[in-house]
Image: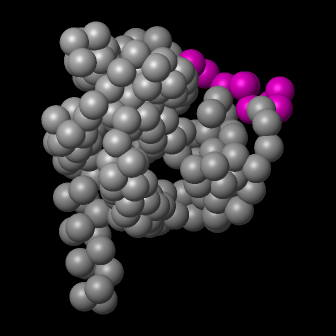
Amino acid sequence: MLARKYKNFLGAWFFKYRGGIWTLFFVGVFFLAHPGISSFLWGIPFVFLGQALRFWAAGSISRYRGESVQAEQLVTWGPFGWIRNPLYLGNGLIGLGWTLMARNAFILVLYGLVFLCLYPGIIIPHEERFLQDLFGTAYLRYKEKTPPLFPRRLFQKEDFRGPFNVEILWKSERHSLYVTVLGTLLFLGKALNG
């Protein structure tokens, strides 16, 4: 009982501050980075792909994502029909892009450790406990057929069926987009001046 309470507290804390944690990580990466034009060009496709995946995922959910885990319905369409955590995979791709731009092997290893500890280690299990409590067997069936972060197959037609809300996308993603664009421009500036 105490262990579950601690896991819930830890998961809720990391979930609430997940954006700030990534921002601090970016600052550290940026100051240790030695980007060049070629490393910037290696990283930029991952940043674009990650942000595009985040847009698709944010527009597929039915409510604004906040500081605590919430859900009005179990979303199983759009990128959620492909993987259970497309927003986190999007973050991972953006982070990988910035890490490649940084041109520093230590940062790449550190990034992998932070990503794996933060998402599969803490945040995803926290969300899954919430979703399983809320949706029960429907969530367990979804979890059984849909991997958490890395797809087992390419997209299929049925993955795309479901509502998409641009208003929720913009409300949920505009701050993430600003950070992604600013961070990428800072790397470009450092690459051009380095």
Does the rendering let one see residue 10? yes
Question: Who's the residue at 79% across and 36% down the image?
Answer: 154
Q: Is residue 175 magenta?
A: no
The answer to which quarter of the image holds residue 36 is: top left
Question: Who's the residue at 64% across and 64% down the image?
Answer: 140
State the quadrant of the C terminus: top left
**Would you say 145 lies left or right of 27 here?**
right
Does the rendering let one see residue 62? no
Q: Is residue 148 above or below residue 129?
A: above
Label count reads 0
State the quadrant of the N terminus: bottom left
Q: Is residue 179 above or below residue 125?
A: above
**Would you say 40 lies left or right of 28 here?**
right
Foreground pick, 173 / 76: 173
Q: What residue occupies the far bottom of the structure in this picture?
A: 1
Question: Who's the residue at 28% across and 70% down the image?
Answer: 8
**Would you say 104 lies left or right of 50 here?**
left
Task: Read off the magenta span.
Answer: 156-164
